[in-house]
Amino acid sequence: MDDQARQRALSTPRDTPRESAPAPEPLVPAGLDATLVLARHGESEFIVEGRFQGQAETPLSAIGLGQAERLAERLARPHASPSLPVPAGPPLEIVHSPLIRTAQTAELIGRAMADEGAFARPITTRPEAGLLEIGQGEWEGLHRAEIERRWGDVLATWRRRPLEAWAPGGEAIPDVAARLRPALAGILSRLAEQGVPGSLDRPQVAGYLEPQTTQPWTVIVGHDGIFKVLLLTLFDLPLERFWMWSFDLCGIGVIEFRAGRPLVRAMNLTEHLAPLLDEAAHETSVERQRSGAL
């Protein structure tokens, strides 16, 4: 069996669940009034090098550390203008993928929140294995050009029909959803324990002046891939729609729960990174002036 055939065999979809399989336990606690803030990690060394990451350990780059610091400052002062749609007070916890790039980002967020100018108190920060990025098997650590050369047909199918193919030795999306669900259920259950069940019999249209809420909220620091699956799971959408969501590095998403019903309040906010872009543009301008380049 040649290399391409072997990889196609390894990437053959698993059997779909039987129709008679028992329905999963409810994911969102009844009446939950709470907020989830989703924050992707900063740029990593593998991203700089153009390598596939998956669950490979790769630390934040110098730029990634700067991005994470800006993200941390934004989340530590969420009601500074323009205000993020999150409740008053500090978050219940910061939950993160155990990988180093997310752990570093979460640590910076926690440090900023403990600052005297922010919440001035330590926030519980803990790793959660269910939030690991999608495993990329044999692709982890390889440059994208090599993957395109050796597994071009598998990669093309993954990009078009992600339930039909995936990285050899890696994770299929249904398997990722299965290990994410109990982790997410635990996060939501802890929020429910801290709050009071709400009602849908209240204004549901944005734009009307409402008092700032004191509902519990939690920050999840994760990855683009796992956030794609998390959102599909929360909104009970088919996993085939995997590519409908996207998170930029250190982008922020806000999901609010109103009486157990999730709604998107913000998605992929990155304006807090603008100063870094301004600095990069300034450095480029200075370098051009020195070199005489147009």
Image (cartoon, helix red, strand yellow):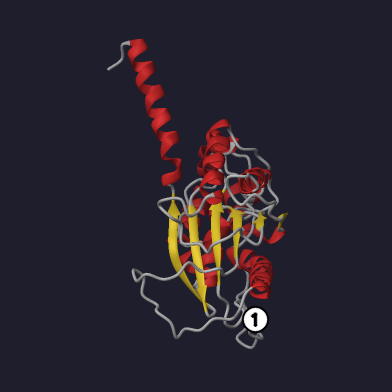
Determine whether 166 is above or below 175 in the image. Answer: above
Q: Nearer the viewer, residue 242 or 214?
A: 214
Q: Position of residue 248 (x, y in %)?
A: 47, 48
In this image, 19 relative to 127: left or right? left
**Viewer-proximal residue among 279 and 11:** 279
- Total marks shown come to 1
Which residue appears at 68% of the width and 66% of the height? 183
Residue labelled with disc 1: 24
Identify the element where label 1 is drawn: loop
For badge 1, the amino acid type reads Pro
Quadrant of the image occupied by residue 188: bottom right
In the image, what residue occupies the spot 61% across and 52% down? 119
Picture coordinates of residue 201, whole percent (x, y)? 45, 86
At which x and y percent is residue 207? 34, 68
Is residue 247 in view from this perspective? yes
Nearer to the camera, 179 or 138: 179
Confirm whether residue 12 shows in the render: no
Which residue is rendered at x = 50% and y = 43% of the image? 148
- Tell me if residue 201 comes above or below residue 55 in the rendering: below
Quadrant for the C terminus, please. Answer: top left
Task: Place residue 111 in its image quadrant.
Answer: top right
Pick out the residue farthest to the left. 294
Residue reaching furthest bottom? 20
Q: How packed is label 1: few (under 14 Cα within 10 Å), some, or many (20 or more)?
A: few
148 vs 78, nearest the viewer = 78
